[in-house]
Amino acid sequence: MNSKDNKRILVLLVFLIMLLVAPIIYLTYFTVFKAGDIINHPANRRSELRENSVKRGTIYDRNHEVLAYSNGEKYNYHRIYNQPVIYSHIIGYSDKIVDKYGLEKELNSYLVGKEGSKILKTFKSIINKKYDPYTGDDVTLTTDTDLQEKTRSVLSSNAEKGSVVIMNPKTGEVLSMVSLPDFNSQNIAKDMQAINEANNGALFNASTKGKFAPGSVFKIVTTTAILESGISQKYTDEGVEKIDNGREFKNAGNKTYGRVDLKKAFTNSLNTYFVRKSVDMGIDVMSQVAEKYMINKKVEFELPLETSTWDYKRSGFDKTALGAAGIGHDTLLVTPLEMCMVASTIANDGVMMQPHIVKRIDSSDGKNIVRNTPTVLSEVTSKENADQITKYMINVVNNGTGTEAYVSGMKVAGKTGTAQLDLKEGTNNAWFVGFAPADDPKVAIAVVIPNVKDFGSQAAAPIAGELLKYAVNNLQIEEE
């Protein structure tokens, strides 16, 4: 056998080895790296079949109360919701006919155990007998069900539409989140046609998806900017503030206050004061502080969350628009969750925490997969500035526009807001944001009642006061 024959044999041998190795590499690559994507792809019919064979994970509240679970047999599991109304916008539903909504949709890959390939999961179940590849992961929320029930009860007793968000300002945990109108998750397939025909927003989570003009609750942001800028806090109020193009801004009730400082202006919510100070500071200071509060910035959250916005870079933006923004108008649009985060920032010494409503996710064998711990989202302002604003907010509740949120024996800090929607009809977005106890905050709150003829002091403040009192007196909130 000559050298040419040896060379041909060697080439053939290498070729045969490549034929054997290539499929192994190919299968390994798809099994380890791509299988999860392929399994989870919506066009994959096997994904749907596999979901029907999996017992969805259980959803708990922070106290390990069961909120949603599955029973039945393989390919015929039924989803049971123990709190089908009060959690309708948080947990949502998973139904073979009408699909998914809420955390049932957003966390579906965990709840049906899709994270990773079936081969790897089966291999894991052989090694670990406690692990079941046909049982999804369990989810524990940050919410307290008693508070959630109380929140829904108080809101629904006072309004047909609206939103309340309650958070732990030190951790960013959402303790309660209610949006009205709502629905019954257990009956969703039967009720869907009626819900669609009613077309009243029952499937719209206003707490995270609704964007509302904030009105005077935005003066918390403007006050932060005033303190950051170092401009004079003195002002002589003559009842009207006229900006360059001739537009006049007046105080509520056309009141005139004379000489005022920042404390008095904040307590009585003087539009004239905050319009003038916004113009004096200029757009650079105002926009920088607003964006520290995450206006115009995407915030990650387990449920779909709209970005709160302010289009100050648009063509034609002028001093009048800047002044209007200083009192929560112009193009400002915010979510209730955003405004609860603003209140939480002041309660937490000027530091905004990353919000979350999922505490942890665990596999069927009890192994932790996801654990959310307190994380700083934005260092907005100094502790000194936050303390100063807290004093102003206490004064609002004790002596100003927020007295309806007063709680005997407890220091409450708050700010009311009334964003005018239609001057002719006299409709407003009625707001209240705040926290308690003001000297050691445990909970922060945002309440918005949209499209009503009442002011924030009338429609939103009483709701906030009742819920802050309940939350502080009944919740066991651990420090983390």
Image (cartoon, rainbow, N blue to C red):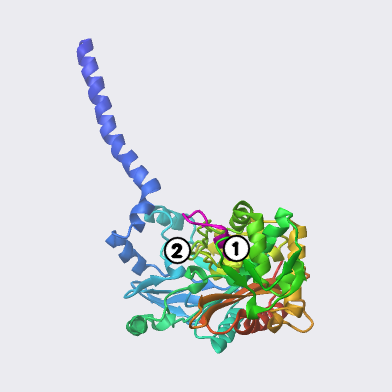
Q: Name the residue furthest front.
A: 246
Residue drawn at the location 34% of the way across and 85% of the way down: 194
Q: Are marks 1 and 2 in contact (CB under 8 Å)?
A: no
Q: Name the spot of residue 15 as percent of width and height, x first.
A: 25, 28
Quadrant location of the N terminus in the rendered image: top left
192 within the magenta span: no
Near mark 1 (Cα within 10 A), the count class, few <14, some 14-19 or many ≥20, is some
Q: Name the spot of residue 279 as percent of width and height, x first.
A: 63, 58
Q: Name the residue furthest bottom.
A: 157
Quadrant location of the C terminus in the rendered image: bottom right
Q: Name the spot of residue 186 as percent of width and height, x first.
A: 42, 82
In this picture, which residue range is highlighted in magenta? 312-326
Name the element at disc 1: loop
In the picture, measured across the screen, residue 480 lies left or right of residue 70, that is right
Q: Distance between the residues labelled 1 and 2?
A: 68 Å
Which of the two discs, 1 and 2, labels the residue nearer the N terminus? 2
Residue at which label 1 appears: 243
Instruction: From the viewer's side, name the closer residue of 287 and 29.
Output: 287
Instruction: From the viewer's side, name the closer residue of 100 and 387.
Output: 387
Near mark 2 (Cα within 10 A), the count class, few <14, some 14-19 or many ≥20, is many
Q: Name the spot of residue 297 as percent of width and height, x first.
A: 53, 56
Q: What residue type is labelled 2?
A: Asp
90 up-or-down from 112: above or below? below
Q: Residue 348 appears in which quarter of the rendering?
A: bottom right
Residue at which label 2 appears: 132
Name the element at disc 2: loop
